[in-house]
């Protein structure tokens, strides 16, 4: 309970900071359009903020200001039992099942997501890269890249997503749109690993889990009985 409370508190603080950065980013974006702010003005603003708040992320304020999205849009857990995946399955199977059930997938991930394509091509230099799924979010007014994983979240997944978001922002994003957002959709995640990985990360990326099977009532009942027995034993031992 104590550990869970600490994690919830950390997430609430993070969500508040994300909303702050998003608000500043919106302010800067509007000023750039309405008053013709250029890069030098934005840089001056960034330096001013760092002077007034020297503890902000070792000089990474510009990235935080321009590349962070509200955390409450993207959920921590998604139920994908409708995919009817075989066991075991590959990332290819997961992606194809989502494409086959795109209507249900859109209903699950939330309103305002518009599907743009799979294996979305990005060219950087002479190299070709492909993101698993690309969406556009109407409320956030930004591109959303989703990477699908069939295992636990690993810190290296974050670096790959940051690269994709940078490429999307430079080569695909329209001038009036907000910075792109990433979702790494994993089968499971260790909350401590996620916390460490995101603590110094300034890109707008969320780590979400998915479930392909619902827990049966029988298993839930069994777990409840086991918990009741443990409580009873603890009371008797006292």
Image: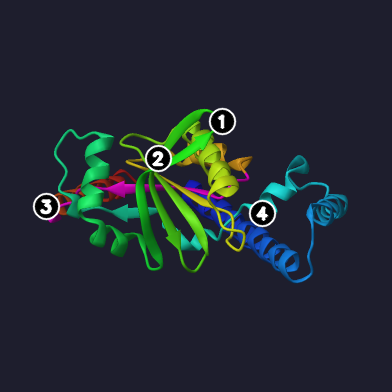
Residue hosting label 1: 125
Q: Is residue 170 above or below residue 140?
A: above
Q: Is residue 153 above or below residue 18?
A: above
Measure the C-alpha gap from mark 4 to mark 3: 48 Å
Give the SS element for disc 1: loop
Mark 4 Cα shell of 10 Å, populated few (<14), some (14-19), many (≥20): many
Q: Position of residue 233 (x, y in %)?
A: 26, 45
Q: Is label 4 in contact with label 3 (beta carbons under 8 Å)?
A: no
| Left or right, residue 64 beside residue 114 | right
Compared across the picture, whether 82 is left or right of 159 comes to left
10 Å crowding of disc 3: few (<14), some (14-19), many (20+): few
* Disc 4: which residue: 66
Lower position in the chain sequence, tag 3 or tag 1: 1
Question: How far is the residue under mark 1 from the one under mark 2?
Answer: 33 Å
Of the two numbered discs 4 and 1 in the rendering, the one whose residue sits closer to the viewer: 1
- Residue depicted at x 56% and y 30%: 125
Sequence-wise first label, 1 or 2: 1
Q: Which x, y percent locates residue 137?
A: 45, 62
Residue that numbered label 3 is attached to: 218
Q: Whole-Å distance between the Cαs marked 2 and 3?
A: 25 Å
Q: Residue shown at 56%/46% (left/top)?
A: 171
Compare marks 2 and 4 and give the one earlier in the sequence: 4
Q: Is residue 89 visible?
A: yes
Going from the N terminus, do you reach mark 4 or mark 3 first? 4
Percent x, y of residue 211: 27, 48
Magenta segment, which residues?
202-217
Labelled disc at residue 189? 2
**CA–CA distance between discs 4 and 1?**
24 Å
Task: Identify the secondary structure beneath mark 4.
Answer: helix
């Amino acid at each position: 309970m104590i550990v869970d409370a600490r994690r919830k508190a950390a997430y609430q603080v993070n969500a508040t900071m994300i909303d702050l950065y998003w608000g500043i980013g919106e302010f800067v974006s509007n000023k750039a359009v309405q008053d013709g702010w250029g890069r030098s003005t934005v840089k001056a603003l960034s330096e001013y903020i760092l002077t007034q708040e020297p503890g902000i992320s070792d000089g990474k304020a510009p990235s935080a200001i321009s590349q962070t999205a509200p955390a409450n849009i993207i959920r921590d857990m998604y139920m994908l039992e409708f995919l009817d995946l075989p066991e075991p399955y590959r990332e290819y199977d997961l992606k194809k099942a989502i494409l086959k059930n795109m209507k249900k997938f859109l209903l699950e991930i939330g309103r305002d997501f518009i599907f743009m394509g799979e294996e979305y091509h990005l060219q950087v230099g002479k190299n070709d890269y492909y993101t698993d799924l690309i969406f556009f979010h109407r409320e956030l007014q930004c591109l959303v890249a989703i990477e699908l994983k069939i295992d636990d979240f690993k810190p290296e997944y974050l670096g790959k997503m940051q690269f994709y978001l940078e490429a999307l922002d430079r080569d695909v994003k329209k001038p009036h749109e907000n910075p792109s957002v990433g979702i790494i959709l994993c089968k499971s995640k260790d909350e401590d690993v996620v916390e460490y990985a995101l603590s110094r990360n300034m890109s707008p990326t969320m780590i979400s889990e998915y479930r392909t099977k619902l827990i049966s009532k029988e298993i839930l009942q069994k777990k409840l009985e086991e918990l009741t027995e443990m409580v009873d034993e603890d009371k008797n031992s006292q």
